[in-house]
Image (cartoon, rainbow, N blue to C red):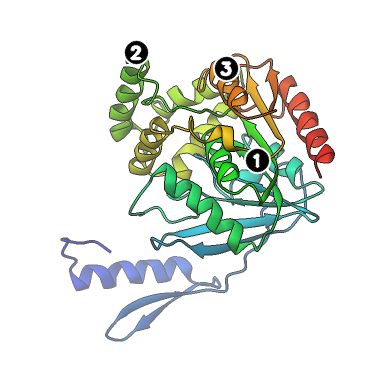
Amino acid sequence: LWPDVSVEPNNLQHNISILRKALAGSSVQIETLRGRGYRLVAEVKRGPTTPRDGSTKHQSIHFCRTSDDVRLAWAELGEGSPIVKAGNWCGHLELDRSSLIWHHIVESLSSSRRLIRYDARGNGLSDHDVPEVSFERWVRDLGMVIEAADLDRFPLIGISQGASVAAAYAARHPERVSALILICGLVRGWRIKQLPQVTRHFEALLLLMEGGWGQDNPAFRQIFSTAFFPDDSKEEIDSFNELQRRSATPENAIKILSTIGDIDLRSEVSEVRAPTLVIHGRNDLVIPFSDGKELAAGIPSARFVPLETKSHIPLAGDSAWGRMESEIQDFLAAHD
C-alpha cells in the first residue's frame, strides 16, 4: 500500500486496536489473517442508483476488455429498441444519473428505449491506468462496447468529443448505424486548426492542469466549468466541478484534452450514410458554433439545428433543452 515507507509492527497493531474499538457493536469487523495481515468483514449490498428525478429504472453495469487490455465499463438502462451513446470526457456511469449535468439527458434517452452507454477509457468506472489514449482507440472502444452489448443496427448519439467518435464509427460502419445524432461536436481539433491564439490557449490550459485539476479546491476546474456553463447556477457549476474531479485523474484529463486537439475527420465525414441530426449552441464557448456548421456541412443531407444557448450542453433548466429534447425524439421517431 505504501511503497518505500516503513511501518513499525507495533504502530500497525495499535491502530488496528483503535479501529476495532471504534467498530465495536457494528456489523463490520476486522479479522486477523495470521501471517498475512487484516481483512475487513462486512455484509455489502448494492442498490440501484437513484437519479435526481426519482426514477426507479434499474441500471445494470457490465465490463468488457479491449484488445490492449483496458477494462471498459458499460451500462444498460431502460427498455425497448436500443440506442447507443458514445463515451465522452467527464462521464461516470454511477454519478451521471444524479448529476445536474447529465441526468436529464440520460433519463430522456432511456424513457422509451434501451440506452447503452459507457465510460471512455480513463474515465469513471473504466480503467484509469491505460496504455494509450488516442482518437483511434476511442473509436475502437465504441465498437467493442457495441459488440459486448450484442447489437446489430441502432441509432447512435455523440456529445462533445463523443460526437466525433460517433461520426467516425458511423462512417466506418454504415451497416450498423440507422440514425446519427451529433451534439456540440467538431471535425477538427484545436491543434489541427493551426490557429496560433487557440493553440496557445490550450497549451496553457494543459500546463495548468498538471497542478490544478485534482485538487479538492475547485478554483482551477472552475475555469472549465464557467466556460462550459457560463449562465448556469452555482449549484450546477459545483456539480460539474465535482464530476470533473471524480471522473478522471489529472494525468488522464491532460491526455484527453490533448487528444481532442488531434481530431481530424475531414476525410471521413463525407462517408457517413446514416440520416444525421447535428445540434449546436449558437454561443458555445467550448466548441464554437462554426465547428457545428462545419460538421453538418461535411455530412451528406445532415439536418442542422442551432440552439439559442451559451452552454456547451443545455441543462434541464435551460430553455434550449426543451428544443433539443423534442428535436432528438422527433428525429428518432422519424428514423426508427
Q: Which residue is depicted at the point 43% across and 22% down?
A: 223
Please say if 268 is above or below 110.
Answer: above
Picture coordinates of residue 32, whole percent (x, y): 36, 81
| Amino acid at pointer 3 | Phe
- Mark with earlier residue (3, 1): 1
Q: Residue furthest bottom?
A: 34
Picture coordinates of residue 149, whole percent (x, y): 64, 61
Q: Left or right: where does residue 99 sit relative to residue 54?
A: left
| Amino acid at pointer 1 | Ile
Image quadrant where one finds the N terminus? bottom left
Q: Nearer the viewer, residue 202 or 125?
A: 202
Q: Which residue is depicted at the point 66% across and 45% down?
A: 97
Q: Which residue is depicted at the point 73% across and 26% down?
A: 321
To which residue does mark 3 refer? 289
Determine the image quadrant of residue 293: top right
Q: Is disc 1 placed on a helix, strand or loop?
A: strand
To which residue does mark 1 refer? 157
- Mark with earlier residue (2, 1): 1
Disc 1: CA contacts within 10 A as few (<14), some (14-19) or many (>=20): many
| Amino acid at pointer 2 | Gln
Q: Nearer the viewer, residue 221 or 234?
A: 221
Q: Which residue is depicted at the point 58% across and 42% down?
A: 171
Picture coordinates of residue 286, whole percent (x, y): 50, 22
Asked whether the residues under the numbered discs 3 and 1 touch, taking CB atoms below 8 Å apart as contact, a structural biologist would say: no
Q: CA distance from mark 2 to mark 1?
A: 31 Å
Q: CA distance from mark 3 to mark 1?
A: 19 Å
Picture coordinates of residue 115, whole percent (x, y): 70, 51
Is residue 22 something one can see in this rendering? yes
To which residue does mark 2 refer? 197
